[in-house]
Amino acid sequence: MVALLATGSVFVLEVYAALRTGSLALLSDAGHLLVDLSGLVLAYIALRWASRPATPQATYGFYRAEVLAASVNGFLLVGIVVFLVYRAVDRLRSPLVELDHVFVLWVALVGLAANVVAALFLHRDAGENINTRGAFWNVVGDGLASVGVIASALLVRWTGDPGWDTYVTFLVAAIIAWGAAGLLRSSMAILLETAPPHVDMEDVKRAVEGIDGVVDVHDLHCWTLTPGQYALTMHVTIEQRRVPTFHGVTQAIEDLLEERFGLDHCTIQVEPEGPAVDRFDSVQGELPP
Ligand SMILES: [Zn+2]
């Protein structure tokens, strides 16, 4: 909420200043702030939503709301980048004649100060959560963007060329694009149900097949519900001699997965080795006694 208020007031100030001075660099900084704002609002809504309990139909609860919010934010960033590059190319063709660089400088300094405040507040819990992390990197990126705008105002002052305002716009657009790429990469990986980066699936397969009584592991899947919450399913073929005590095998697998890979939400299907001793077939569909 603190980050939201600080970012919101600076956004209004920067748009006003950008319109008054015609500075595209300031407008790009404001554009980045707009995405920060939507990102913060989305993160806030998603956090509230994600903490709702599971229902009989929504069995996983609403964890993925956070991941959805992060990807929406990533696409918004891409839109802002396209808009800024378009405007900057336009500005290269018809450059500004002059720029009130003193005013731009002061507004950019205020923007930088607000960013530092927001980053300090968000940094405290930016670890696991994809949205606070996304929002945190947005604010850091925006701090860099403000530094860029400050540098452009100084360059305009020293060289007398308002073109620096446009060159810095490309730089800010690149910073935003970099942030968007990271956010989209991590949220898409989760939506595509890829295995979490810290779990090497070949390693999991080897480790489980190393357990006494396990012959083979197949249909192995592991995915992220939301950062910090993982699920895994697998089929294991076990030796005939271990069938009566298969519970010991599944327990050993569960312990291994939890201790070594930090996976505690696992579903294991046990299948006996060799041709099934299938009593159902021999009695033609009748149930065994
Ligand atoms: Zn199977």
Image (spheres, grey):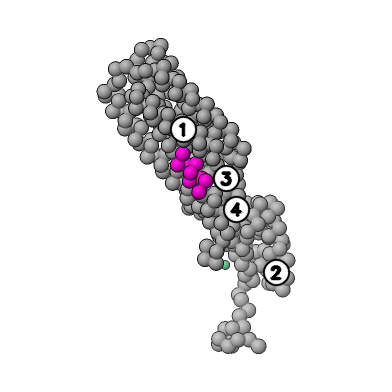
Of residues 120 and 232, the one drawn nearer to the viewer in this rendering: 120
**Disc nearer the start of the sequence (3/2):** 3
Q: Are the residues tagged 3 and 2 within 8 Å (C-beta)?
A: no
Q: Residue furthest left?
A: 94
Side of 162 where 230 appears, left or right: right
Instruction: Give the quarter of the image for residue 213.
Output: bottom right
Q: In the image, is residue 284 above or below residue 26? A: below
For discs 1 and 2, the disc positioned in front in the rendered view: 1
For discs 2 and 4, the disc positioned in front in the rendered view: 4
**Disc nearer the start of the sequence (1/2):** 1
Disc number for residue 146:
none
Which stretch did the figure color magenta?
A: 37-45
Disc number for residue 129:
3
Element class at badge 1: helix
Q: Which kind of residue does numbered mark 4 sit on?
A: Gln
- Where does residue 63 sit, x and y in percent of width and height? 54, 54
What's the CA distance linking mark 1 and mark 4? 36 Å
Element class at badge 3: loop
What's the CA distance linking mark 3 and mark 2? 38 Å
Q: CB at mark 3 closer than 8 A to ligand 1?
A: no
**Disc nearer the start of the sequence (3/1):** 1
Q: Magenta span has 161?
A: no
For discs 3 and 1, the disc positioned in front in the rendered view: 1
